[in-house]
Image: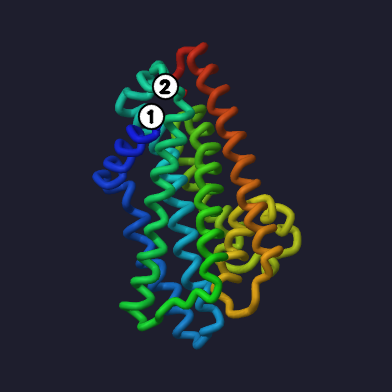
Amino acid sequence: MSLLAATGRFQGRLVLTHRDYLIDLVRTPLLAAVFLLLVRHNDRPDLLAYGLLAPVLMGVWSMAMLISGEVVDSDRWLGTLELQIAAPAGFARVVLSRVWVTTAISLLTVVEVGAVAFLGFGIVPDVPHPFVFLVGLLATAVATAGSATLMAALFVATRTARTFQNSLSYPVLLLGGVFTPLDRLPEWTHPIGRLLYLSWSSDLLRDALDPAPVTSASAAWRTGVILGLGLLTGIGGRLLLGRVVRLVRETGTVGLA
């Protein structure tokens, strides 16, 4: 717990003082305005849930991917990566703690999008199923932290994380049904999309904003899938991170990858 608290304070201060880390919190209100303008211009109030959720999920995913890469890249650039790996505390635990704090901060995008909808468009977001929405949002945060841990392991093994950051975001968001439901995409993308927790998260959160009933069994099943996929990626990231750390120690390439 002391390690979690220490890394949490450090990462929290880093996020709040590093301008690059805050870019998604700055970009999310702008994206929300664009999506809501499109909904209003086309007179499609039925798409309001899409306009509200897309910038939230984009912000949560993008911020987690940015920080998970920068945790390694910036530490390597500052020359502190070697010190962290050599420290008694497990490197994977440190990375996971920092990713968790970042993911928690990224949930501020929910407040930002709600503020843009109310102040900019006079829309009071209605959540007919608040419990389903809250549980789905928390499950999404857990799964995002797991995916970010897996990405962090890949970033340790590569010379730079930016290639992954720049190439992964939009394909994952598209196949994850963030912009449009997965069943509206070509059929060959469905098996791939269902392997991504975002496709289950986006469907569940959209249903939570829909007045139509959401059965407990359906919500529980989809929440379980989100958490299961997050757990699998988190465990995979934890194992891969340990293996990569051992490898770079043996080869003496911690700072070079």
What's the residue type where badge 2 is placed?
A: Ala
Q: Quadrant of residue 3?
A: top left
Determine the residue positioned at 59% across, 28% down.
Answer: 239
Indicate which disc residue 3 carries: 1
Indicate which disc residue 89 carries: 2
| Near-viewer residue (148 or 40) | 148
Q: Is there CB contact under 8 Å for labels 1 and 2?
A: yes
Would you place residue 117 above or below residue 225 in this image? below
Would you place residue 79 above or below residue 74 in this image? above
Of the image marks 1 and 2, the number of the one nearer the N terminus: 1
| Near-viewer residue (184 or 47) | 47
Would you place residue 88 above or below residue 60 in this image? above
What's the residue type where badge 1 is placed?
A: Leu
Q: Quadrant of residue 200?
A: bottom right
Please provide percent x and percent y for residue 74: 35, 33
Query: Which color scheme did the rendering employ for the protein?
Result: rainbow
Determine the residue positioned at 54% across, 42% down.
Answer: 146
Left or right side of 121 for 212: right
Label 2: element kind:
loop
Q: Quadrant of residue 117?
A: bottom left
